[in-house]
Image (spheres, helix red, strand yellow):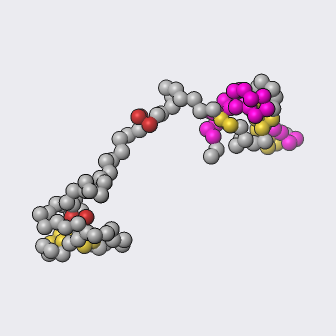
Amino acid sequence: MKPDKKSIEAKCPACGRETLLLRKPLYEGFTRVGEELSCSLCGHRFADEESPEYIERSGPAVFSEADRPAEVKVFSEEDQPSFCRHCGHYVVNPFRQWCSRHKKEVEATDTCRDFFRRAEKEES
Ligand SMILES: [Zn+2]
């Protein structure tokens, strides 16, 4: 994975220390052809952007797992409510959702006392 441009701290394989990477633009004549990354401590040159073992800092600027919006709760197989979409009577096609037992249109999230769990998930 290509690291964030701001990740300039890395572990240097040459001197084994945590170091700041130095970026030096590389020119071919007057054309900029890329950047050379090197260790600020020992001068070791990295072959490319992917070479350095970047150090990831967790800090205020970095979002942690806890900052992410809460995931929609996923029901386990047993906890699934009696929604029509899990029901064996539920028939769906591009135009409508249909209850084959009550012969009426339903919503996927409707519930029903005649609900029976479909044996296995049908792939459409
Ligand atoms: Zn080094």
Asked whether the viewer can see residue 108, the reply is yes
Q: Quadrant of residue 18?
A: top right
Q: How many numbered tags mark residues here?
A: 0
Q: What residue is drawn where x is 76% and y is 26%? A: 40
Segment colored magenta: 3-29
Magenta-span inclusion, residue 44 = no
Q: What residue is drawn where x is 15% and y is 74%? A: 101
Give the camera-side residue of 30 and 116. 116
- The residue sitting at the front extreme is 78
- The residue sitting at the right extreme is 29
Q: Quadrant of the C terminus?
A: bottom left
Q: Is residue 81 above or below residue 65?
A: below
Asked whether the viewer can see residue 98, the reply is no
Magenta-span inclusion, residue 19 = yes
Answer left or right for 67 relative to 36: left
Residue 102: x percent and y percent? 12, 73
Q: What residue is drawn where x is 19% and y is 67%? A: 116
Q: What residue is drawn where x is 61% and y is 38%? A: 4
Residue 16: x percent and y percent? 74, 29
Give the camera-side residue of 58 and 60. 58
Q: Is residue 84 above or below residue 15?
A: below
Give the camera-side residue of 86 and 50. 86
Residue 15: x percent and y percent? 78, 28
Answer left or right for 26 relative to 52: right
Answer left or right for 19 relative to 78: right
Q: Is residue 74 above or below residue 5?
A: below
Give the camera-side residue of 53 and 69. 53
Q: Quadrant of residue 80?
A: bottom left
Residue 27: x percent and y percent? 83, 39
- The residue sitting at the top extreme is 41
